[in-house]
Amino acid sequence: MNIHEYQAKNILSQYGITIPKGSVAYTPLEAKKVASKVSARGPWVLKAQIQSGARKKGYFLEEKTGRGGGVRTIKKRADIVKNAEQMLGSTLVTVQTGPKGKTVSRLYVEAYNNVEQSFYLGIAVDRVHSVLTLLAASTINEEITTLAINHPEKILRLPLTLEKKTNMAQVRQVMEFLHLPQKSSNSLKRLINGMHQLFLDFDAAMVEINPVGLLKNGTLIALDAKISFDDNALYRHKDILQLYDDYEATERELKAAKYKFGYSEFEGSVGCIVNGDGVALAVMDLLRKQEVGTACFLNVKGGVDKDKIISGIKIIMTNPRVEGILINILGGFLRCNLIAEGIVSAASEVGLNVPLVVRFEGTNKDEAKDILIKSKLPIIMADSTEDAVNCLVKAMEESE
């Protein structure tokens, strides 16, 4: 689960992390009032609150908004209402939202902070090495995603423990890597420890500050913030669950949530149905190696009935971006025959107009295969994840 920037910053501040003075606004007049409270003279920063990165470089679909992005520095008080009117209710498109963009329903109004240096700092789980990892990088000329792909050596990675705070040796490593002044050492230590403790307390999946700003006095300030929470642990955090924004979710995401399925959308053309995040990531990696992107994936879980499975499969089948479907099930608690029955039922309701490849392994695998064979549907059966990906890519190429 993701939350908005202003919500993430509120949580960061509870852990002793310095944030700019700011507040959320839902109308242009409210934005003007908030601006007066956070800074008497300005400048101010207006930030579109959608759950997406690269908002500053984004653009609005509506012509009335001109060429302004989703993050704007405002120098004159008289310009606050005008810019807020342009942004609120308009559709912001970024590299992460896709061409449809997202409607801006609220703004975060902040006091502008002049910084001497900025950089990226994040904490995430390194699933390859099964360790919590601190990530640091200078992002003056490049985005962190670009660095990760093209120059991974420019990102510092330090392992963190689940019990102890960050030690001074690690703080010094970060300072040397980022060329930070000595006067920032205590602020950096407080920042990293705050992010670390937050991550553990809330069962986070990722905590990211991009960018962190260096003030003249050496203090480090979170100029932006993003926190993602592990959906599987939200039952332990009712207060965090209340931050969920239905307005941000698509109709398909809401349907998936109704049945307690995990659902994510991307920019590719393949719809994946799996039972486990690890299985999903393996499929996405194999598709990426063949230069094929994932449009969405649905993570179904054990303890579901046939009707829920049918509804879940229909979510994928009715996604207009999907040009091919890959179903990869490792049956344990989830029986493969349930998935097979769901495929047949869903296809009879909405049709099957794109290539579909299925790989079953585990509970009731043979029964599941028999169900699909008897259905006479044009379904391709595969024996492994690699085989399934290869078969789907080939089938999609032949269907063009």
Image: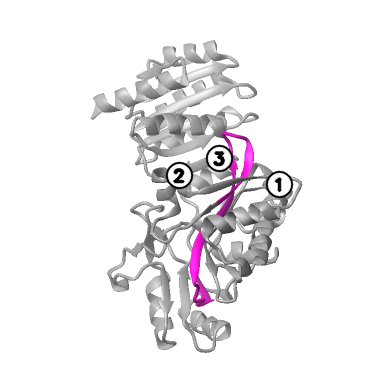
The residue positioned 32% from the left and 72% from the top of the image is: 65
Tag count: 3
Would you say residue 22 is visible in this rendering?
yes
Q: Secondary structure at mark 2?
A: helix
Separation of disc 2 and disc 3 at Cα? 29 Å
Of labels 2 and 3, the one closer to you: 2
- Which residue is tagged 3? 262
Q: Amino acid at mark 3?
A: Gly
- Which residue is tagged 1? 235
Question: Label 3: few (<14), some or many (≥20) within 10 Å?
Answer: many
Q: Amino acid at mark 2?
A: Pro
The residue positioned 56% from the left and 57% from the top of the image is: 176
The residue positioned 50% from the left and 77% from the top of the image is: 112
The residue positioned 59% from the left and 72% from the top of the image is: 218
User: Is 376 contained in the magenta span?
Assistant: no
Residue 387: which disc?
A: none
Question: On the image, which quarter does residue 397 sit in?
Answer: top left
Question: On the image, which quarter does residue 175 sit in?
Answer: bottom right
Q: Secondary structure at mark 1?
A: helix
Q: Which residues are magenta?
A: 107-135
Separation of disc 3 and disc 1 at Cα? 15 Å
308 horizontally vs 232: left or right = left
